Amino acid sequence: MLRILGKATSINVRKVLWTCRELGLAFERDDWGSGFRPLQDPAFLALNPNAMVPVLVDSNPGNPGNPAELALWESNTICRYLATRYDTGEPDSLLPRDPAARARVEQWMDWQATELNNAWRYAFMALVRGSDAHRDTAQVAASCAGWNRHMGILARQLDHTGAFVAGASFSLADVVLGLSANRWLMTPMKREAYPAVDAWLARLEERPGFGEFCRNGIP
């Protein structure tokens, strides 16, 4: 029923894989991306003209009036779709039905995709990917500082909730930001100490798929 296109090492693919594991969904995954089938392949571009992973293909999207399969791109959108289509865990669902509770989850998901990602991009490309286009030491330092500052925003939110990102219950916000926090921990840079983030990651260890798709062997 579900196919996920993208290599398992991609942080955005792992968002979708972790979400599927939380929901108990069976899926097939096809390797696409660097080292595998090229994203410029016309078959892939027909599904995502941006030539980026992941892509979700759902052969049974649940709309009787439109039985054709559904292809989606943008990792956070895919996670939202899966939670809306397949999650029956109300009231503690991954994406609450209550408008205010849902908005709190989605604001942190959007913050991850826009504010946090933009903060870490230059430092990550320089320090992890070794990109020749990201060698400016001043920009690396600024990116590291911005990354730490944004993680401080997350830490203060976790101090406030005392539990998970959007409140007392685990949600999609914890999936996408858990993977972001893991990337922060794995990047060779000077990090600020945020006990609230450490405690939150310890809570996430109890979740299905965390060790498989998020923590990557970090003790």
Image (cartoon, grey):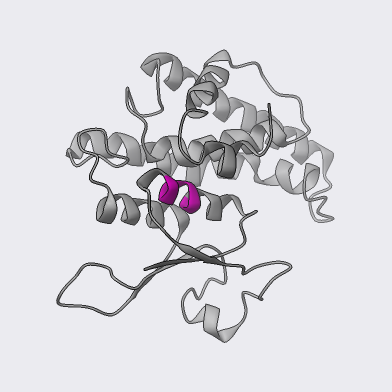
Q: Residue at x 41, y 28 (%)?
A: 165
Residue 149: horizontal and vertical position, in percent? 59, 26
Q: Quadrant of the N terminus?
A: bottom left
Numbered disc total: 0
Q: Residue at x 49, y 46 (%)?
A: 114
Location of residue 101 (image quadrant): top left
Q: In the figure, 204 relative to 59: above or below?
A: above
Q: Quadrant of the C terminus?
A: top right
Q: In the figure, 120 relative to 11: above or below?
A: above
Location of residue 36 (image quadrant): bottom right
Q: In the figure, 33 relative to 182: above or below?
A: below
Residue 159: horizontal and vertical position, in percent? 44, 14
Q: Nearer the viewer, residue 23 or 93?
A: 23
Q: Which residues are magenta?
A: 16-21
| Residue lying farthest to the left in this orientation | 65
Left or right for 211, reference 62: right
The answer to if 112 sits in the magenta stretch is no
The answer to if 19 sits in the magenta stretch is yes
Q: Nearer the viewer, residue 122 or 175?
A: 175
Q: In the figure, 152 relative to 217: above or below?
A: above
Q: Nearer the viewer, residue 81 or 142?
A: 81
Left or right for 92, reference 24: left
Residue 155: horizontal and vertical position, in percent? 51, 20
Location of residue 105 (image quadrant): top left
Q: Residue at x 74, y 49 (%)?
A: 125
Q: Residue at x 61, y 56 (%)?
A: 8
Q: Nearer the viewer, residue 38 or 110?
A: 38
Residue 64: horizontal and vertical position, in percent? 15, 74
Q: Main secondary structure of the magenta part?
A: helix
